[in-house]
Image: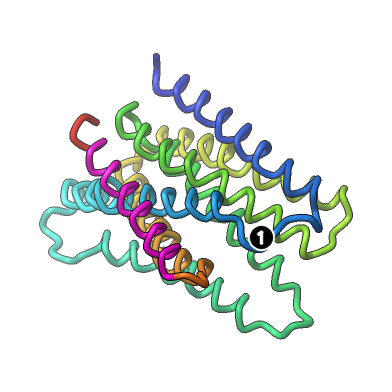
Amino acid sequence: MTITSYQAIAGLLIFITSLIAVIYPIKKANAMPQHHSPLELGDAFASGIFLGAALFHMLPEAIHGFDQLWGNVHYPIAELLCAGGFLLLLFFERLSGHAHSSTPVPFLLIGILVIHALIEGTVLGINTTISAATIIFIAILVHKGSESFALAITLNRCRLSLSTAIIIIALFSLMTPIGILVGALLNASSRVDLLSASINAFAAGTFLYLSTLHHINHHHHKHEAEGFLEFIILVFGLVLMAAVCIWL
């Protein structure tokens, strides 16, 4: 199988996952409970996957890429871009959290999800080997269900019309496949090595944010045992990605 075929299949599977994950909450609308343990455990596992992908694959690849390009430049360029990705999502989330109640805060949250979905796809598309793309694909696919579910909950709270909700869902679902296409097209650029290193570094920061501060901010528990179980599940996802790196 060629990398192009693999990326096309990955994009289709991610698109289908995005759509399936929003069907139930959109249909149930007001019947959705605030505390959904299976979803929160799944999100914890996905956070571990994202954390592992960022630390064990994306950031090291970016650092290696910049070393290959500018080995004589002794400056942490990859780490700087990684911090930029982390701070960008932190800025957007803080902006949405401190905005006045009359402002469309949910739309800021929707924007964060849409932008990140595009970045995810671009990272997958710009990888030129199946082994590297597989690591990113696993991380995206596992997390996509939780992101789509969160989007559906946000849309329910906005009390949007069904047609508007469908447009937003379609846009979100298409963002990762579009990102894959963008990444694949960037591979045709003469500066593909620089683009790949930069995107991997920046996206690693967004992955780190989603798996740490974002996870903590959106997971509150009445019982300590629930939080500890989530932590164990997150660590399991991280260890799984560390094990995957042995073979890929």
The number of discs equals 1
- Say which residue appears at 37% left-offset and 47% top-offset: 49
The range drawn in magenta is 224-244
Do we see residue 110 in this rendering? yes
Front residue of 174/241: it is 241
Residue drawn at x 42%, y 71% is: 87
Disc 1 packing (10 Å; few <14; some 14–19; many ≥20): some
In this view, the residue farthest toward the top is 1
Coloured how?
rainbow
Relative image position of residue 207 (x, y in whole percent): 40, 56
Q: Position of residue 245 (x, y in %)?
A: 23, 38
Q: Is residue 126 magenta?
A: no
Quadrant of image for the N terminus: top left
* Disc 1, SS: helix
Q: Callout 1, which amino acid?
A: Ile
Residue nearer the viewer, 181 or 116: 116
Q: Is the C terminus in the top left, top right, bottom left or bottom right quadrant?
A: top left
Q: Which residue is mark 1?
A: 110
Q: From the viewer's perspective, is residue 210 above or below residue 118?
A: below
Which residue is found at the position 75% from the left and 78% from the top? 103
Res. 113 image quadrant: bottom right
Left or right of residue 192, residue 96 in this image: right
Magenta stretch encompasses residue 229:
yes
Residue 144 position (above or below residue 128)? below
Residue in view at x 73 percent, y 43 percent: 24
Most prominent secondary structure in the magenta stretch?
Answer: helix
State the image coordinates of residue 140 (x, y, percent, origin top left).
47, 42
Q: Is residue 170 visible?
A: no
Where residue 105 appears, as percent x and y from the top left, is 70, 73
